[in-house]
Amino acid sequence: MLTGRGMVIAMVMALGSTPIQAAASPAAESTLMGVVTAAEYGLSLSRVSLTLRSESNHAFIQVRATDHRGAFRFDELPAGIYSLEATRAGFERTTVEPILVLEGTTRSEHVTLQSSHTKPRSS
C-alpha cells in the first residue's frame, strides 16, 4: 500500500495517463459577398449602404458600403438566415431575404436597385 509521497506520485501518474477530451472546435465562420447594380442600366453602384441582420432575432450584425465597383463583403458570419437591406439616394430601398448562409461557406448575392425617379411617359 502506498502512503505519503508514494501516493501523490501514483495519483499524478494516473492523472497524466487519463485521456483528456479535446475542447470542441469553434464553428467555421462564413462570408457573404456580392455586387449591387442599378436595374435601369445594369451598372454597378458605389456608396450603397448595406445593413445585414440575423433573421432569427433581427439583431443588428454588420453595416458596410459598396466599393467603387459596387462590390461588398461581410466576413466572420455565423451560419444562419439573414436579411440584407440596401439603400442609396435616388434609389428605392431594397431588402433581400431570406439569405441562407451555411457554416464555413462563401455565399454570393446580386442586389438590384430600382431608381426612385419616375420617368415621364411619352405619348
Image (spheres, rainbow, N blue to C red):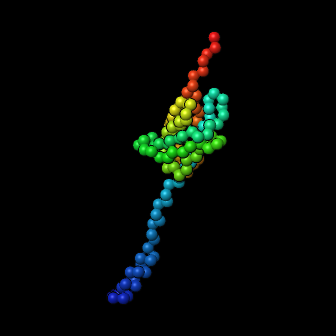
Who's the residue at 49% across and 59% down the image? 25
Residue 99 visible: no
Asked if residue 55 shows in the view, the reply is yes
Would you identify the image quadrant in which residue 14 lies? bottom left
* Residue at the (36%, 85%) spot, across then down: 7
Name the residue at 55% across, 33% down. Answer: 89
Instruction: Give the image location of residue 44, x and y in percent.
Output: 64, 37
Q: Quadrant of residue 123?
A: top right
Give how far across and how far down residue 105 sits, in percent: 57, 48
Q: Residue furthest top?
A: 123
Quadrant assignment, res 19: bottom left
Quadrant location of the N terminus? bottom left
Q: Work out whether 7 lies above or below 99.
A: below
- Seen from the viewer's position, the closer of residues 3 and 28 is 28
Q: Residue at x 38, y 88 (%)?
A: 6
Q: Position of residue 16 (x, y in %)?
A: 44, 77
Count of marks overlaid on the render: 0
Relative image position of residue 96 (x, y in whole percent): 52, 35
